[in-house]
Amino acid sequence: MIAQYPAERRDGCRMMVLDRASGKIEHKTFENIAGYFKAGDLLVLNNTKVIPARLFGKRKSGGKVELFLLDPLEALLLTGLEKKNPMCEALVRPAARIKEGEKIELESGDEVEVMGRVEVGRFVKFARPLDDILKESGHVPLPPYIDRKDEESDRQNYQTVYSAKDGATASPTAGLHFTRELLDRLSVSGLRLAYVTLHTNYGTFAPIKTDDIESHRMHKEYFELTEETVKAVAETKRSGGRVFAVGTTTTRVLEYCAERFTLNASSSTQGYTDMFIYPGYKFKVVDHLITNFHLPKSTLMLLVSAFAGKDFIFEAYRQAIAERYRFFSYGDAMVIL
């Protein structure tokens, strides 16, 4: 049931609708999403753009090596002499066999030096600007549960139609269902659109391994919140409109910055967030959530359980399995009202 490819049409996927007030569950298609908005509502989307963060190479012995860059944003933003020899953290496979200081030859012919270990992976050092290397030999960083090689079509399919700011190593997949035509129709109907940026990274797939969820540590992710979006959220709340968040990443930015909306702050903000939302959390900004079906034992499953209640979410997943919904990044959608 894990989708290996996206739906033929972005908005042609199935859509499960959960009504928290009535406890009702409906089965629709995503092209019906417009019927759940009212004039004066606000739709907030994450405009991050996925970079080709997976690299393949070989050892001097000929053995194959895979590098998955974990948080390459700082390396991409380097200037001057530092830009010529950037370093960043990466998952290196096979990890155990590669010694510190070993050099890997990439498909582009560039050499990468594998360095010391960090909490999740290894430091890797490049011999020329990272953006040049990624353009020449980077692959679409499909998640590990998509059991195939990336294809040319993934360069478009694994990107939202409104992606604008390079930096993500994982797609904000709830947004993959929107087409440009659908967004245009929604805008004309009186729905307001606003954007945040959160550069989703590999940590979004990290399972919870602790028995006590409060002991789980989230990976930090870079975010930006514009003055325009701050004003849009504040005005929507004042006028009685509802805030729809597209995805858990958008939700985390809005909830992390919740104080800015209540104070009606008039400036933009940026930084890193490791906000962990789990049952018991009281949502301050987001009224409704558009999301996908998530991995078990994940922080995303806990977030939607906090939003809709664990029992309601588990019933929705039981129905999704019975109805043969398609799961995870390229899968079907869920709307929680």
Image (cartoon, rainbow, N blue to C red):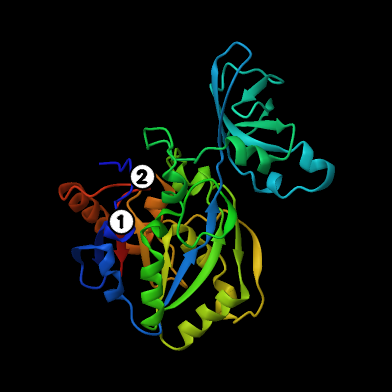
Identify the residue at horizontal 43%, vertical 71% (top origin): 286
Tell me whether the residue at label 2 lies in contact with that at label 1, contact meaning CB atoms closer than 8 angstroms. Answer: no
Farthest-out residue, left:
322
Q: Position of residue 2 (x, y in %)?
A: 30, 41
Q: Which residue is mark 2?
A: 295
- In three-dimensional space, the C-alpha distance between marks 2 and 1, rounded to whole angstroms, equals 23 Å
**Dot 2: what SS?**
loop
Q: Nearer the viewer, residue 84 or 290?
A: 84
Q: Position of residue 292 (x, y in %)?
A: 34, 54
Left or right, residue 125 beside residue 24: right
Left or right, residue 123 beside residue 288: right
Q: Nearer the viewer, residue 262 or 38?
A: 38
Left or right, residue 67 beside residue 125: left
> Is residue 318 placed above or below 104 in the rendered structure?
below
The C terminus appears in which quarter of the rendering? Answer: bottom left
| Mark 1 surroundings within 10 Å by alpha-carbon count, few (fewer than 14), some (14 through 19), many (20 or more) | few
Give the quarter of the image for residue 259.
bottom right
Residue depth check, mark 2 versus mark 1: number of the one nearer the observer: 1
Identify the residue at horizontal 67%, vertical 41% (top origin): 132
Q: Nearer the viewer, residue 57 or 281?
A: 57
Give the quarter of the image for residue 48.
bottom right
Farthest-out residue, top:
61
Q: Which mark is residue 9?
A: 1
Residue kind at label 2, given as amino acid type: Leu
Farthest-out residue, bottom:
239
**Dot 1: what SS?**
loop
Q: Position of residue 311 (x, y in %)?
A: 25, 56
Q: Earlier in the sequence, mark 2 or mark 1?
A: 1
